[in-house]
Amino acid sequence: MSKKPVSGSGDVVTYLKEQHEAIKALFVETLDAKNATEQQAAFTRLRTLLAVHETAEEMMVHPRVRRKIDGAREVVDARLTEEHDAKVALAELENIPCGTADFSKALIHLQAAVLEHAEREETEEFTLLEEQLDPAELAKLATAVEIAERIAPTHPHAGVESAFANFAVGPFASLLDRARDALRGNAA
C-alpha cells in the first residue's frame, strides 16, 4: 500500500482529510488503470486504505464525537450507516473481476457513495470536532487514529461499525486479513 498521508499539524481533522484526498486519488488510479493487473493493484491499495480508515474512525472518532458533543448522535449514526453500506459494496466489489465493465460500474457507484460520505464527514462531523475540541484533544485523537489503523482489518467487515465490535472483532479480523493478503502477495 502506498504511504498514508501524515498530518504535519498533528490534528485529527487534517489527518483524516488528507486520507480522504488519498482515497479520491486511488479511485481515479483504479478507474484509469491500463489493464486488469494494474487495476487489481490499485484496487488493493484503495480497499486497504478504505478498510483501515473507516475502522479507525469507528474505533476512535465517532465515539469521541458521541461522548463530547451534545446532539451529535444523529450525525454519527448517519455516518455509521453510510460506512456499513460502503463496506457491503466494497465486499461485493472484491468478488468482481478487475478489468471488466461490471467492476468499473460497481467501482463508480462506490466512488460516488464514498465521496459523498467523506464530504458529509468533513462538513458535519469534522466541523463539530474542530468547534468542540481543543488543539491538544485533536492531536491526541490523531495519535489514537494512527494507532487504531495499525490493528485495523485490511478488508471490509460489514456489521462491525461500533467501537466495541471493532475492539472485540477487529484484531482477529485484522490478523486473518493480513495473513490472507500476505499469502496472496497483497501485503499492505
Image (cartoon, helix red, strand yellow):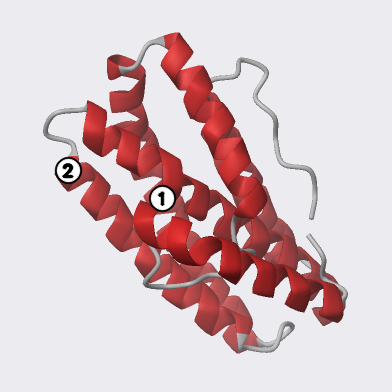
Residue 75, how many percent across, how many down? 22, 43
**Could you tell me if residue 181 is visible in this image?**
yes
**Could you tell me if residue 35 is visible in this image?**
no
Residue plotted at (39% across, 35% down): 122
Q: Amino acid under label 1?
A: Glu
Q: Is residue 16 above or below residue 157?
A: above
Q: Residues within 10 Å of mark 2 (few under 14, many from 20)?
A: some
Report the quarter where the N terminus lies.
bottom right
Q: Secondary structure at mark 1?
A: helix
Q: Amino acid under label 2?
A: Arg
Quarter holding residue 22: top right
Residue plotted at (45% across, 62% down): 168
Q: Secondary structure at mark 2?
A: helix
158 vs 178, nearest the viewer: 178
Name the residue that disc number 1 marks.
58
Left or right of 121? Residue 124 is left
86 vs 109, nearest the viewer: 86
